[in-house]
Amino acid sequence: MKTFEFAIIASGLDPNADDFESIFYNNGCDDALVAFQKGHTIIDFARQADSIDEAIASAIENVCATGATIERVEPDPLVNLSDIASRTGLTRAAVSNYAKGLRSKNFPAPVVRVTSDSPLWDWTEVSHWMFKNKSIGRDEAVIASVVKEANVAIEAGDKNIRNRLKQRADLEEATLEAA
């Protein structure tokens, strides 16, 4: 088993309730730190599982059992150059050179705030590019895809997240293996 670190952002429970933290603990979130910040409940997991899809799916089920409403899974799928550098262990200058096409070709284009001084990239696209260019391992690229799929499923209200995440993980493993 591996330990996977991620956070679930939720709402709907009273952070001032006497049992606020224990309700998470008693519903299977005993491997998480629970905090209330900026109007949101943050459940920060270090979950052991055989795969990222299993870790996230089980955490989602546990958080749902508390009665909380899940808003999203983090790490955030939108990243700036500093985030990319931090997640890959590269310098910001190296990532900037990739983005400008000075160090390699075909780096993904930003997807949000394209015309601003602080554009954002889709972490899944960047992680796949980084994997193909041998800057990160396959596991990191699979994790990026599964987190993104979890957020799509949450937004769609999909009740079968476990199967959906397993399918995404299997597809990503096969796709990246062929790369």
Image (cartoon, rainbow, N blue to C red):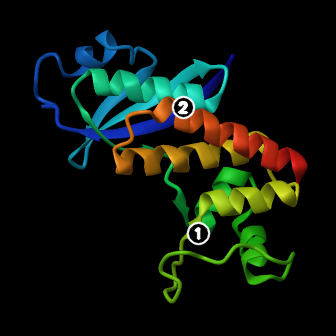
Labelled disc at residue 86: none
Residue 70: x and y in percent read 31, 39
Residue 140 is at least partly visible in this image: no
- Name the residue furthest top: 26
Residue 21 vs residue 124: left or right? left
156 shown above or below 2: below
Say what amino acid the circle numbered 2 marks. Answer: Asn
Q: Residue at x 67, y 20 (%)?
A: 50
Residue 107: x and y in percent read 76, 73
Kindly identify which residue carries mark 2.
163
**Label 1: element kind:** strand
Q: Residue at x 25, y 20 (%)?
A: 21
Say what amino acid the circle numbered 1 marks. Answer: Trp
Q: Quadrant of residue 41?
A: top left
Residue 71 vs residue 77: left or right? left
105 shown above or below 46: below
Kindly identify which residue carries mark 1.
121
Residue 89: x and y in percent read 74, 52
Q: Earlier in the sequence, mark 1 or mark 2?
A: 1
